[in-house]
Image: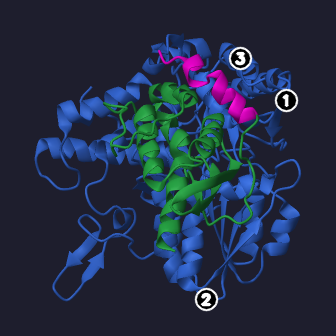
Amino acid sequence: MTLSSIPAQAVSRSAGAGLELRSDATQLRSDFPVLAREVHGRRLVYLDNAATSLKPQSVIDAVTEYYSEGSANVHRGVHLLSQEATTAYDAAREKARGFLGAAQASEVIFAHGTTSAINLVARSWGDAHVGAGDEILVTVMEHHSNFVPWQMLAQRVGATLRVVPLDPTGAVDLGAYVRLLTARTRLVAVSHASNVLGTVAPVSEIVRLAHAKGARVLVDGAQSAPHLPIDVRQLGCDWFVCSGHKMLGPTGVGLLYGPLEVLDEMPPYEGGGGMIGQVSLEGTSYATAPSRFEAGTPPIASVLGLGAAIDYWNGLDRPTVFEQEANLMAYAEERLTTVPGLRIAGHAAQRVSVIAFTLGDIHPHDIGTVLDTEGVAIRAGHHCAQPLMRFLGLQSTARASFSFYNTRDDVDALVMGLARVRRMFA
Amino acid sequence: MPDLDELYQSVILDHNKTPRNFRKMDGATCEAEGRNPLCGDHFTIWLKVEDEVVTEATFLGAGCAISKASASLMTSAIKGKRRAEVQALFESFHGLVTRAPSDTTPSGTAVRLPPQMDAFRGVSEFPMRVKCATLSWHAMRAALDRAARS
């Protein structure tokens, strides 16, 4: 397939006629070449999906194909290669629109990831619309990427950052949220799903309450995009951001969605090529969204790879796949609670498949190192969520995070590995 | 394949479980905190330096088995050592855990790491854990530098 043959219209979100949707985990595993690899002589058991997902062959092929067959810049040249690259790039934006459920492709900006997308909003919208005495609300479960940019904004403009706590189960404390939400609140920034506890925030409710107070809402979808159906119009949020690499795509690209009327309130963030209307010695007029926010040559290969990742998602029977993942999560919790001394952090009713845990007083890094020699890849540490760690009274945790390509065998390998950890540090 | 038993030798497991010199020091002449921003591990090191000799060393904090055992053994090893000797030990230890070409003491002093420290040789097989092993050493050196300045 050449770049120009990629269809401009995204594959339908629902099952198209004659399109066989897939859901068999064993079969899907064969799409991910990394899963065939051994680690320290053991089968790779990849349980670090919240850090980054593995990539299916089709995504790898899309990136390779761009460099081997295209490799031209977009929105610039008149030659064939540039036209092909531009067509494919625009097609990827349309696919992203479909994935997010946005009304128009021009409401989807290609950022470099969740972090860069949040910083873009904080710098562009934040500097223009948040001032001294205003308040910004975040929850205590935010990843540093949805915490630090707001703290920096508050310090820049003299605003106050307020933090919504969690209830004892690890769910967002809506009562506290309502109390903290005031006429001074300009912006609410919340994770759709926590990268530590897996907690899913009641985003629609949070948005409804915020809008009633005249505040805008940014939803950090880094952890929800690969685990929940996303529909930005149903969520009603003002911005939705996510990372390509956590949803089967390449690193270096992320999505920033905003309704056009919100994007229109935002001055440019980075100046440069591609984001202008006209440039003269006297001044510059700026392009409309999305180009206004895509200065410079974009990460074209990564964007095309993300387009391929969305094609892959569209080929999955997502309701079935997500249900299987929920079942696997339940199995993992059941098995993990049989490990003496193991404590799971967070039991919110609604969670994605992320399990943070401690094991007696054994340091999570030691757990991670022992598991690694068994081929089991987990994350250990504060998970870039130090305010949450402090709130929970923990210094760090181990974390196992799942995807649809994980199996019960993976959970069993984790539990076996933990038995070895316990023997070692008994 | 890196050998787990090489990394978690009994000396390390023992010092992790029952760290020596694990207390705050009254009358310390200098102190410094070591923090690994990647994992959040942190230790505070207290030193008593008299006439350029470290007469006492203690630590408190939280970290993994490697970092805690390292701090435990280090505080024992530097006691009674002159500043230059401590610097030589630092370099020897660094060479040991990073498997630098030579484990001789570059500063030319005769001081050697105590044999027990050999337990950290396995760390070099685990590059991600070198920072754990050297965290308290860097904090100790920062404390010594502070003592020199005051």
Which quadrant of the structure image shows residue A291? bottom left
| Mark nearer the N terminus (1 vs 2) | 2
State which region is magenta: B1-17
Q: Residue furthest front?
A: B51
Q: Main secondary structure of the magenta part?
A: helix
Crowding around mark 1 (Cα neighbors within 10 Å: few <14, some 14 to 19, many 20+) is few
Residue B7 highlighted magenta (yes or no): yes
- Return the residue at label 3: A420
Image x and y of residue A123, in percent: 47, 73
Q: Amino acid at mark 3?
A: Arg
**What is the secondary structure assignment of the residue under circle 1?**
loop
Q: Is residue A221 left or right of residue A424?
A: left
Is residue B86 among the parts visible in the rendering?
yes
Residue B118 highlighted magenta (yes or no): no
Which chain: blue?
A
- Return the residue at label 2: A132
* Residue at screen point 22% across, 35% down: A67
Q: CA distance from mark 1 to mark 2?
A: 48 Å
- Return the residue at label 1: A341
| Picture colour for chain B | green
